[in-house]
Image (cartoon, helix red, strand yellow):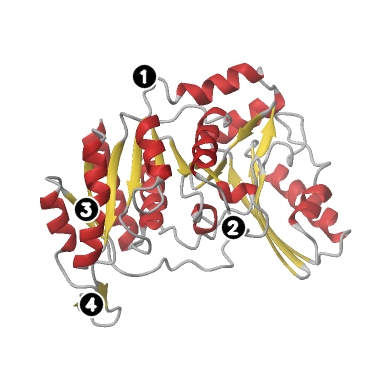
Amino acid sequence: MLTREQVLEALHSLLDPEFKKSVTELNLIKDIMIKEDSVSLTFIFTKDDEGYQNNVKHAITNMLGDKGISNVHIRFRAITEHEREQAAAVANPAPTAEKKANGMALLSPESNVKFIAVASGKGGVGKSTVTVNLAVALARLGKRVGIIDADIYGFSIPDMMGIEDRPVIVDNAIEPIERHGVKVISMGFFVQDNSPVIWRGPMLGKMLRNFFSEVNWGELDYMLLDLPPGTGDVALDVHAMLPESKEVIVTTPHATAAFVAARAGAMARATNHDILGIVENMSYYECRKCGEREYLYGRGGGGKLAEELQTELLAQMPLGAPDNHVSEPDFSPSVYKESHPTGQMYLELARKVISKTE
């Protein structure tokens, strides 16, 4: 069975008509899925022409056919403005110093980027699920969004968003992966075979700083940081690095989860970070057949936490999972579709975040 790298190598000679470079170098081939003798992928086109797309389909089918692939499924999608900027940067690389300055500019006092740290007192409450869906919802509302997966020991964002690509280095700067309109960087991109990260505190802080200084983020409106649960080294580094960061705290309705989450809120208060509000996750389970709600983890934890921290209960998200299917070209295990009721709830959460930060 072919590997993803072999598929990209097979398509390397295919040139983009606008930038005159290989579509693989320009990162215009995405979402590659391989199953025995079949390959599905997304082709991002810069030229919206049916004849061109037919030629591309024919060329890719032949190129992969030469490698023994008999079934090729291609999903065509128009290039986004951010992807066009990335492709232009590959075709006409800017000086290295300028790209590094771009990453450091995110941390400068003059930066207009709004930092939102998503925190929880304990693991297993759905903090990362809230992070990815809030980020995607902000992007759907037209915002330029990035995610730093700062949970360096327990990184999960790439898998949750269905990201199979890896960052490329252009002129000594790392290009983040874009998925659902969100730029993403994670420790998960830099380890092999889901290996554990065995580091002490200072190394964690250095990696986190590299996520800012060594990555070409471009222009952003929002940067979300998925923090590790609790109040450890990474959370302390984030609070020190980003004194203007806002915070969203995630809990479940269970009294103990809310009690533990209060510690994360107390840490934000102690470091003068504004708390935007509380997201109560797994608030209830709604029966698909009868519509009746069951409160499996109790009730009231999020509201009590919001009252204790003198902030707002921003949302109460139901227990469930996206109705995505693995065969979909843009499959993401944890991202709700915009049309899904929970996807609509995340859009409303994003609107509240925008109103509180802008």
> In the rendered view of the protein, which quadrant contains the C terminus?
top left
Q: Of circles 1 and 3, which is in front?
A: 3
Residue drawn 43% across the image and 68% down it: 323
CA–CA distance in space, label 3 to label 2:
29 Å
Mark 1 / mark 3, whichever is N-terminal: 1
Residue drawn 40% across the image and 47% down it: 227
Q: Secondary structure at mark 2?
A: loop
The three-letter code of the residue at mark 1 reads Pro
Please identify the quarter of the rendering in which residue 196 is found.
bottom right
Question: Going by the image, does 121 lie left or right of 76?
Answer: left
Q: Which residue does the numbered mark 4 point to in the structure image?
A: 291
Mark 4 / mark 2, whichever is N-terminal: 2
CA–CA distance in space, label 2 to label 1:
35 Å
Q: Which residue does the numbered mark 1 point to in the structure image?
A: 109
Q: Which residue does the numbered mark 2 point to in the structure image?
A: 196
Give coordinates of residue 157: x percent, y percent: 49, 53
Q: Are marks 1 and 3 in contact (CB under 8 Å)?
A: no
CA–CA distance in space, label 3 to label 4:
32 Å
Q: Which mark is residue 262?
A: 3
Residue drawn 29% across the image and 55% down it: 250
Mark 3 / mark 4, whichever is N-terminal: 3
Mark 2 / mark 1, whichever is N-terminal: 1
Please identify the quarter of the rendering in which residue 90 is found.
top right
The three-letter code of the residue at mark 3 reads Ala
CA–CA distance in space, label 4 to label 1:
49 Å
Give coordinates of residue 131: x percent, y percent: 38, 50
Q: Are marks 4 and 2 in contact (CB under 8 Å)?
A: no
The three-letter code of the residue at mark 4 reads Gly
Question: Going by the image, does 318 lie left or right of 330?
Answer: left
